[in-house]
Image (spheres, grey):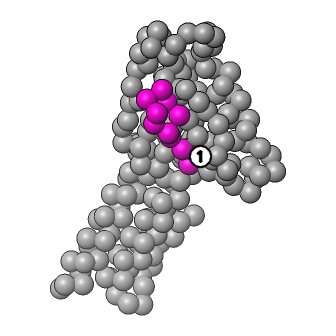
Amino acid sequence: MFSTVAVLVPVRGAAGGPAEEFGAAAAMFGTVVFIRRIAESRIVLGRETLTMVEPLMTYEVHYAAVSRVGSDGGTLMVETTDGEVLHSMGFGGSLVDHFVGTTDKAVERIRLRLPGRPQGHRKTEAPPAPPVRRRVTRSWPTDIFLAATVICAACAGVVNLL
């Protein structure tokens, strides 16, 4: 919906002239980027890794590197063997979660995939877990909207200078 309006504003014209048209389009495209980044947050359970897709960064954690998984006030939390704590925005404690318990269900599904830790073994005896892989989250549609936001904002600035 926002993308359609963002395209129509420059086409149909705004009362303030081209600079305001480009500015309005940039604001609408920026809103689409913001909403999509948050809405695309999720956790993907793979064979050997848990992938936590956040708005800006994606974390890939081997199940062997997970020391604890739980819920912190409705927010899904994963603690690694290195002591790093990752919070999932995809399970950020919503009103729906309060009634349905989606975070607790996700925690249980993750726990089912964790390898069993033998009792009586010290932490140092286990082979070292692979480190957490970090990378920038890519979403081609969102990145295209981000480019459109920057282009429209730049055009608004240039047109305003003329």
Q: Is residue 56 above or below residue 115?
A: below
Residue 73 location (% of width, % of height): 67, 50
Task: Indicate yes or no whether the magenta region holds residue 82.
Answer: yes
Residue 61 visible in the picture: no
The answer to whether 46 appears left or right of 160 in the picture is right
Which quadrant holds residue 145? bottom left
In this orientation, which residue lies closer to the viewer: 32 or 1? 32
Residue 59 visible in the picture: yes
Q: Helix, strand, or loop for circle 1?
A: strand
Q: Main secondary structure of the magenta part?
A: strand
The answer to whether 66 appears left or right of 92 in the picture is left
Query: Which image quarter holds the C terminus?
Result: bottom left
Q: Residue furthest bottom?
A: 15
Residue sitting at x 42%, y 77%: 24
Mark 1, Cα crowd under 10 Å, few <14 / some 14-19 / many 20+, is: many
Residue 34 location (% of width, % of height): 48, 60
Residue 147 location (% of width, % of height): 33, 57
Residue sitting at x 60%, y 9%: 120
Q: Is residue 8 above or below residue 116?
A: below
* Residue designated by label 1: 90
The answer to whether 2 appears left or right of 155 in the picture is right
What residue range appears in magenta? 79-89
Which quadrant holds residue 82? top left
In this orientation, which residue lies closer to the viewer: 15 or 49? 49
Q: Residue furthest left?
A: 162
In this orientation, which residue lies closer to the viewer: 140 or 46? 46
Residue 4 location (% of width, % of height): 51, 65
Query: Which image quarter holds the N terminus?
Result: bottom right
In this orientation, which residue lies closer to the viewer: 152 or 38? 38
Task: Indicate yes or no whether the magenta region holds residue 151.
Answer: no
Residue sitting at x 45%, y 36%: 84
Residue sitting at x 43%, y 11%: 127
